[in-house]
Image (cartoon, coloured by chain):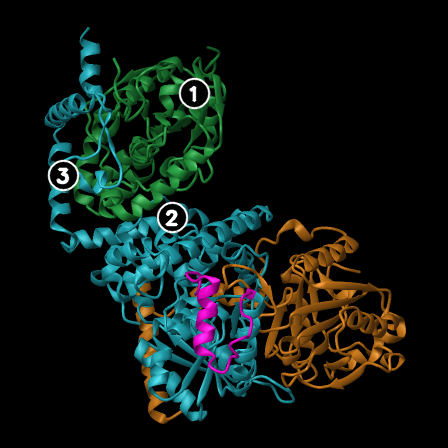
């Protein structure tokens, strides 16, 4: 930006804020008036949370699957980490999809015995735009609407969530929460523990890409993935659990055991 | 965008006699309304959430300056920039400067009504920068050089064969024998063309559904994923947002998001809701290197604190137009500027003036359906009436209507005289109309009898008969 | 009649509405009968109009001029009842708004608003009416007029009473909650749009298969009756009160008087 631009901004800024204050009939808020606002941001209280997810943990998990399937996400429930590579290759075979996978560099994905499926050709990194299949972890699953929550990070490039035709997400059952608010608090806890604020991006993904722009007829795969597939890992083996750092584990505030 | 709002009547007339448009509008009548009804009914807390969402926005607007400053502080802390722009011209120049400093030749765009409001595409083209719309509907109308006719379904006025024609005309290297007869094939064609544009763009410009004061984040909600590719792939991401988009916390936005998709498309949640905070972080493999927010006023602060204040709660879901019988009769282009339907009838006069947009708040039956479905409980009919009041205060409006109202008021405030006039009128019309029961034409009532009969009065007024009954 | 055991006697001022007065006095007499059946004493104060034409045209000064008379005329009745959701809504919802900037009248406007009701919802919700003593042979369909529906919550009450009419069956109208295109001055200011709306409405009425269309507002009824007759759709049109008061022996709205 040029200097002139910067100065223009500055006077525009004070004029805009001034116009807002004049319209509200007051000057800048003093510390007393601002205190409740500060508190609102610091405490970020939840508003009304729909009762839909008020149910025991197994039922929350079932709700997640049901809501995800309702928006054309496919879900494969597997017993534990060891079953993941087989589930992935079977999914690809079932839909006659290529077995070239671009996968997040995240070490949480190392717990799966990929070597047992040598026909899967796995490459780690971001997507360049011509990858047929991506595989990523997620931060959380939100049962309320069957939504995946994926956060960006050095190990979690977000191009994987949007460019490939098929997006496979590996999600652990203990990552599934009821409403959005619980997921936000888990994210805040994770980020605070890592000493940072918000990740660059948080993607809430609810089903494959879609459009209704032509005569309101729903078409999947407008620009993003045509297929969204979740491999839901119901149990964690104790040994593998230790390796799953980086936010994939449950946080203390979750409603789940 | 050049307004034709003053010509609303002519625009509407044309639209009503456009069979292709009318066919396309059928989809709207039977799609959005039913889906919204089902989605709202499936969430028992929906009505309570509307009250809470209204309160969240009211609270934010009452403290807008404070939340904007806090939002800015957080954007800066995350490595982003905030550009305060009072007018459309300032916003255009700011965006141009960002594009130039990035050496941009092509910019991709996520759907943004504010970009339409400031006529950004024409401006960038003039300056030698190619803007590429990436939302499918927006892309189609960009190829046709038309404005959007709906705020979330910009090509809702078109039929599938219109889209096929458009692609055949614009995608010149398309083989003539390539089949494009299915919506699926049209989507795939657009996907292929736009994929290369996404990867080539230097700057990505998106709007924002919300700005979060707590975190300095911007939020976009899409179904196609185009907004995400727009903001993730180029080296610069520009967020273009008006200042009333700010909400306090992630919890607050979660509440409003529960209403947005349900009210808009009738989905429980849109496919993609993305929360962006600043540029690429050290070690990141993707994401923009620069993150700019262009924060636009363009008439908003002038609505704050007036009788149009509540309009600033609008989250642009489109429920009002989806349920508006006038919108569904004439379509969005008839309104003549960026924002159609009931929300446009209130917002447009505020942004481009009541002299130009005077028809818009008048072209309503006040049926109230818009307000009844508005997730933010904006009293749209009431505010349309306020615009009518402003017109009367300023002596605008047709002279005949003013005289008619004057004569009516003269009589209506003189009960005895009024009673006599009514008695005479009812008597004469009753006698004349008794045989047929109706009039096919009446002097001075062409507006009515041009399209429908006028039922004849029974003959004697109620009060005349009542007086007689009480005399007996 | 097994109505209103609980409701105490009361004095109701009938707000006749200008369209009822001029076009369809039968509706006024039907309202009187229904109110008397519900144990009310009915008076008809000197009146003209509620002021809505001016109010909705943005002419607050003239709307106030007319409204002031209404407030004065109905000052000493227990309730003000209008056979119209539109005028009822004006009195109940909009008078307090209209006088919000005039403290000296605002109180009186609020006082009036609190006592003001649309006829059918008054009978059911305030007077506890459960059924009527009436007979009507045939299928009817019912259009929910916008103001009554959205400002005053008139929806189930007319249907509940209609179900008690001997010989009558209800065929629900597709799009019953969609505006008919009347909208007061709208229908003459934007006749082409209004025409499209009422044409669609007429088609829905035809599709309902009912021989009679009922609604609770004369404006909408005149609009729909006028369109149905222009299109030659053989559906009789009446105010719902006529049927409920067993006074549907008069020619329907827009039909020839064969007396």
Classify residue A202 as left or right of residue C100: right
Please give the label number shown on residue B325.
2
Q: Return the residue nearer the eye: C123 or C135.
A: C135
Q: Nearer the viewer, mark 1 or mark 2?
A: 2
Q: Return the residue nearer the eye: B471 or B194.
A: B194
Question: Height in image: A254 above or below B216?
Answer: above
Please give the label number shown on residue C127.
1
- Find the magenta span and give its range: B155-183
Residue B420 lies, in percent from the top left, at 11, 24
Question: Height in image: A105 above or below C9?
Answer: below
Q: Colour of chain A?
A: orange
Secondary structure at badge 2 equals: helix
Which residue position is annotated with label 3?
B444
The chain coloured green in the image? C
Question: Height in image: A52 above or below B67?
Answer: above
Q: Nearer the viewer, mark 2 or mark 3?
A: 3
């Amino acid at each position: 930006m040029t200097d002139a631009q910067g100065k223009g901004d500055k006077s525009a800024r004070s004029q805009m804020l001034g116009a807002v204050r004049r319209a509200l009939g007051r000057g800048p808020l003093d510390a007393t008036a601002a205190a409740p606002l500060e508190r609102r941001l610091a405490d970020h209280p939840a508003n009304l949370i729909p009762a839909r997810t008020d149910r025991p943990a197994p039922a929350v998990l079932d709700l997640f699957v049901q809501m995800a399937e309702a928006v054309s996400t496919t879900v494969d429930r597997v017993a534990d980490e060891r079953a993941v590579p087989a589930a992935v290759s079977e999914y690809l075979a079932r839909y006659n999809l290529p077995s070239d996978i671009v996968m997040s560099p995240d070490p949480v994905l190392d717990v799966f015995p990929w070597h047992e499926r040598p026909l899967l050709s796995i490459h780690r990194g971001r997507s360049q735009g011509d990858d047929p299949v991506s595989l990523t972890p997620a931060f959380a699953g939100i049962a309320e609407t069957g939504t995946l929550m994926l956060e960006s990070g050095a190990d979690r490039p977000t191009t994987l969530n949007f460019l490939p035709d098929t997006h496979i997400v590996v999600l652990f059952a203990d990552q599934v929460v009821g409403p959005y608010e619980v997921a936000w608090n888990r994210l805040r806890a994770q980020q605070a523990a890592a000493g940072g604020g918000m990740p660059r991006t948080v993607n809430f993904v609810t089903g494959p890409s879609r459009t209704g722009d032509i005569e309101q007829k729903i078409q999947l795969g407008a620009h993003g993935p045509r297929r969204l597939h979740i491999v839901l890992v119901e149990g964690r083996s104790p040994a593998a659990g230790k390796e799953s750092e980086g936010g994939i584990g449950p946080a203390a505030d979750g409603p789940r055991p | 965008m050049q307004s034709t709002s003053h010509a609303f009547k002519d625009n509407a007339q044309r639209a009503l006699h456009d069979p292709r448009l009318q066919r396309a509008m059928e989809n709207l009548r039977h799609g959005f309304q039913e889906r919204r009804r089902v989605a709202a009914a499936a969430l028992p807390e929906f009505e309570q959430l509307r009250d809470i969402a209204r309160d969240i926005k009211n609270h934010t607007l009452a403290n807008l300056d404070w939340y904007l400053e806090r939002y800015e502080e957080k954007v800066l802390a995350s490595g982003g920039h905030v550009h305060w722009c009072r007018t459309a011209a300032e916003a255009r120049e700011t965006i141009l400067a960002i594009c130039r400093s990035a050496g941009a030749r092509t910019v991709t765009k996520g759907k943004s009504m504010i970009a339409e409001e400031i006529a950004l595409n024409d401006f960038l083209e003039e300056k030698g920068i190619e803007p590429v719309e990436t939302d499918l509907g927006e892309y189609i109308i960009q190829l046709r050089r038309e404005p959007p006719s709906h705020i979330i379904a910009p090509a809702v006025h078109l039929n599938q064969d219109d889209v096929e024609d458009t692609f055949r005309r614009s995608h010149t290297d398309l083989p003539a024998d390539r089949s494009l007869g299915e919506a699926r094939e049209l989507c795939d064609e657009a996907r292929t063309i736009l994929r290369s544009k996404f990867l080539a763009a230097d700057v990505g410009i998106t709007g924002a559904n919300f700005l979060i004061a707590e975190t300095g984040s911007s939020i976009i909600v899409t179904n196609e994923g185009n907004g995400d590719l727009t903001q993730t792939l180029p080296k610069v991401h520009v967020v273009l947002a008006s200042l009333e988009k700010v909400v306090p916390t992630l919890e607050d936005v979660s509440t409003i998001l529960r209403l947005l998709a349900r009210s808009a498309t009738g989905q429980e949640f849109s496919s993609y809701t993305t929360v962006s905070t600043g540029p690429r972080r050290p070690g990141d493999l993707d994401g923009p290197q620069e993150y700019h927010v262009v924060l636009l006023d363009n008439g908003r602060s002038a609505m704050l604190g007036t009788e149009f204040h509540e309009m600033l709660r609008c989250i642009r879901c489109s429920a009002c137009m989806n349920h508006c019988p006038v919108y569904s009769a004439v379509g969005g282009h008839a309104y003549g500027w960026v924002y159609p339907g009931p929300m446009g009838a209130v917002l447009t006069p505020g942004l481009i003036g009541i002299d130009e947009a005077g028809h818009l708040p008048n072209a309503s039956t006040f049926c109230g359906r818009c307000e009844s479905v508005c997730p933010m409980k904006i009293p749209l009919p009431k505010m349309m009436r306020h615009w009518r009041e402003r017109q009367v205060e300023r002596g605008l409006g047709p002279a005949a209507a003013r005289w008619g109202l004057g004569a009516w008021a003269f009589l209506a405030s003189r009960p005895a005289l009024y009673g006599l006039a009514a008695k005479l009128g009812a008597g004469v019309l009753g006698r004349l109309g008794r045989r047929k029961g109706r009039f096919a034409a009446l002097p001075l009532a062409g507006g009515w009898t041009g399209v429908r009969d006028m039922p004849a009065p029974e003959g004697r007024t109620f009060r005349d008969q009542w007086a007689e009954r009480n005399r007996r | 009649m097994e109505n209103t055991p609980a409701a105490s006697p009361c004095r109701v001022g009938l707000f006749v509405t200008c369209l009822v007065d001029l076009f369809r006095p039968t509706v006024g007499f039907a309202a009187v009968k229904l109110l008397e059946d519900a144990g009310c004493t009915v008076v008809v104060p000197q009146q003209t109009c509620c002021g809505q034409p001016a109010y909705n045209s943005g002419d607050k000064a003239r709307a106030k001029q007319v409204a002031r008379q209404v407030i004065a005329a109905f000052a000493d009745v227990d309730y003000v009842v209008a056979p119209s959701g539109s005028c009822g809504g004006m009195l109940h919802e909009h008078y307090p708004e209209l006088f919000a900037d005039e403290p000296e009248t605002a109180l009186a406007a609020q006082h009036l608003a609190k006592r003001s009701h649309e006829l059918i919802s008054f009978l059911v919700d305030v007077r506890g009416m459960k059924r009527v003593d009436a007979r009507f042979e045939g299928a009817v369909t019912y259009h929910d007029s916008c103001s009554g529906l959205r400002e005053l919550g008139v929806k189930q009450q007319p249907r509940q009473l209609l179900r008690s009419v001997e010989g009558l069956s209800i065929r629900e109208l597709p799009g019953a909650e969609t505006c008919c295109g009347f909208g007061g001055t709208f229908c003459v200011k934007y006749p082409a749009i209004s025409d499209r709306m009422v044409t669609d409405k007429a088609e829905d009425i035809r599709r309902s298969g009912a021989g009679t269309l009922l609604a609770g507002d004369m404006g909408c009824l005149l609009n729909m009756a006028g369109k149905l007759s222009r299109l030659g759709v053989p559906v009789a049109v009446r105010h719902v009160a006529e049927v409920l008061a067993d006074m549907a022996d008069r020619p329907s709205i827009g039909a020839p008087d064969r007396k």
